[in-house]
Amino acid sequence: MSRTLHDVASGTLFGVALNYQGLLDQHLAAFQQAPYQKPPTKPVLFIKTPNTRNAHRGVVLQPAGERLQPGPALGVVIGQRASRVSLENAMAHVAGYVVVNEFSLPEDSYYRPAVKAKCRDGFCALGPQLVARDQVANPNQLSLKLFVNGELRQESSTADWVRDIPQLIAEISEFMTLHPGDVLITGTPQGRVDVQPGDQVEVDITGIGRLSNTIAAEASA
């Protein structure tokens, strides 16, 4: 492929919260209380701002005095403009897939966007390459594994998604146009772990690749 990953995935980074059934189940009791009153009925979206972009083998800085948690996720790269697309035609708008590590500080609430938790510099690593859509037989049956210093710390599967890729594209494009190069971060599973400066953090997704990043301490002001 002549174009780099940055070229084909240079658009907006859209995160989808609570898209793993296990994670949603953990919060069901809270969603019956104020201010929620009921579980979400549409995708819960947030944006990873441009400053969060990071790459394979990039360094992720742990903010001083904060807990840092990686978030393994499958990224879906949009290849064609998508506006009000149907479920049946949604996959035609996908260029391919990429491994994402959506770093965050711990979150206490899904009611308001956690900008300070999710939008720190370098908090969204993508890589190591784009895998074309037709090279992945079934993106709904992919194993996600998180390794810290070579030790398996988290394991899940895209089979546990609340909404699969066609559902996400159809529901999101109903009110917002997706453009070529945009990336849908399809969600992180339950069970986030803490990482420390010096740790090597790797996300492995079956058939997509293995994304590696190193954690370093943020320099004091």
Image (cartoon, rainbow, N blue to C red):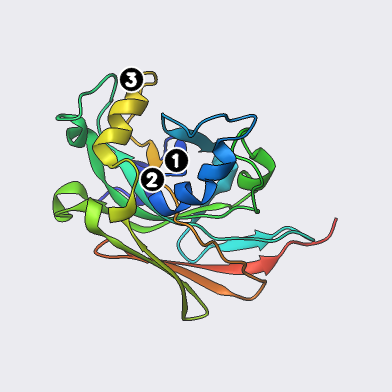
Using a 10 Å C-alpha cutoff, classify the residue at mark 1 as few (fewer than 14 neighbours), some (14 to 19) or many (20 or more).
Answer: many
For label 2, the SS is loop
Amino acid carrying mark 3 in the image: Glu
* Residue at (51, 31) in percent of width and height: 38
Q: Is residue 14 visible?
A: yes
Amino acid under disc 1: Val
Residue 210 spot, x, y in % from top left: 37, 67
**Which mark is first along the chain, 3 or 2?**
3
Quadrant (top left, top right, bottom left, bottom right) of the C terminus: bottom right
* Up-down relation of residue 216 to residue 152 (above or below): above
Is residue 1 among the parts visible in the rendering?
no
Name the residue carrying label 3. 174
Name the element at disc 3: loop
Q: Where is residue 195 drawn, in percent x and y?
A: 62, 69
Residue on which the image places disc 2? 186
Answer with left or right where residue 103 lies relative to residue 152. right
Tag 1 and tag 2, C-beta contact below 8 Å = yes
Tell me where residue 159 sits by quadrant: bottom left
Residue at numbered disc 1: 16
Dividing the picture into quadrants, the one containing residue 112 is: top right
